[in-house]
Amino acid sequence: MMDNVSKLTIFTLSGLHEIANYRVTLFVLTLLCYCVIWLINLAIIVTIIMDKSLHEPMYIFLCNLCINGLYETAGFYPKFLIDLLSTFHVISYAGCLLQGFVLHSSACADFSILVLMAYDRYVAICRPLVYHSVMTTQRVCVFIFFAWLIPLYLVFMSSITTARSRLCGSHIPKIYCINFLVGKLACTTSIANVIIPAFNYTFYFLHVMFIAWSYMYLIRKCLISSENRSKFMQTCLPHLICLIIVVVSLLFDLLYMRFGSQTLSQNVKNFMAMEFLLVPPIINPLIYGFKLTQIRNRIIQFLSGKRI
């Protein structure tokens, strides 16, 4: 059994050697960005938790989306900030697997939560008379539980198969670790290392297809009703924008990672690698904060010192 386990203890990361001349500036900007991510996501989370009138399925799902944004960025920014001030960019074997687990599971949880939000809007607009009987508190709790459990379990199984591989290299050509790049260092490819990631990709591709179908159906329903059209613009449009941002950001990185050109500069590569860790965690809560009137009003009341 031990013959199949890698004895590597450290991986080297690439992408930061060309920024030596302005790493302090980049450190300050990155720290500022991370603080902004925490500030705006935490503002949405606290507002929803503190205001009982926001304890509805749509807002509960939004709260979990923001929590996932903090979970996702916590897997990247602290280590990246340390690397910016260090001359040696390395990560332990266990740390690499943990970082890969956090980044993969958070990306999958994004899609799980977005599916719940799409289903919630479908029921609210297309079946309003049974909405409260369908989206009960108990059922919403079950939905949220599985929206976290399934991504964590699937990615855990993928991480286990990666950890069991014997590795023939220790260089990760990226500023952070993910299972795909660790798997590419394996001396041989096992069936499990192919089947499990393929299943995970297919499973979450079906999530995207379900969301796309639900919105096509919603748009068709809204075209024949001004009331439904108003609901769609108020609650569905922010969700649709968030979905597009998440999908485009992840596809941008995924397609580049598999088919990207080696002629691109390292700075461009770094930006492409960071995009899904930078854009969705900032833009998503801002979109909901500005678009959803109840959340916007509660935040304004809180900032002005009024009781929620």
Image: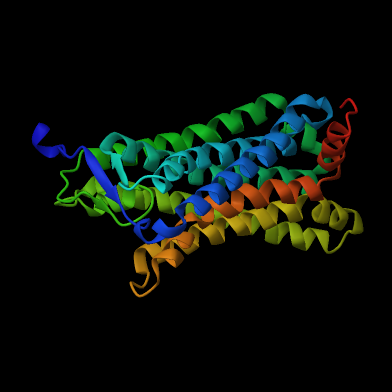
Q: Which of 76 and 203 is in front in this view?
A: 76
* Residue 151 place in picture, x, y as percent: 46, 39
Looking at the image, which residue is at 50% across and 48% down?
27
- Let me know if residue 210 appears in the view: no
Q: Which of 23 and 262 is in front in this view?
A: 23
The answer to whether residue 245 is above or below residue 124 is below
Q: In this view, does 227 lie to the left or right of 146?
A: right
Q: Which residue lies furthest to the front in this view?
A: 21
Q: Is residue 12 left or right of residue 228?
A: left
The answer to whether residue 1 is above or below residue 266 is above
* Residue 30 place in picture, x, y as percent: 54, 49
Q: Which of 122 and 11 is in front in this view?
A: 11
* Residue 307 place in picture, x, y as percent: 89, 25
- Let me know if residue 232 appears in the view: yes
The answer to whether residue 8 is above or below residue 168 is above
Q: In this view, does 274 lie to the left or right of 51?
A: left
Q: Which colour scheme is used?
A: rainbow
Looking at the image, which residue is at 57% across and 51% down?
29
Q: Which residue lies furthest to the left in this view?
A: 3
Q: In this view, does 245 lie to the left or right of 98?
A: right
Tag count in the figure? 0
Q: From the image, which quarter does the N terminus lie in? A: top left
Q: From the image, which quarter does the C terminus lie in? A: top right
Looking at the image, which residue is at 41% across and 66% down?
256
Quadrant in the picture for residue 79: top left
Looking at the image, which residue is at 82% across and 37% down?
299
* Residue 226 place in picture, x, y as percent: 91, 59
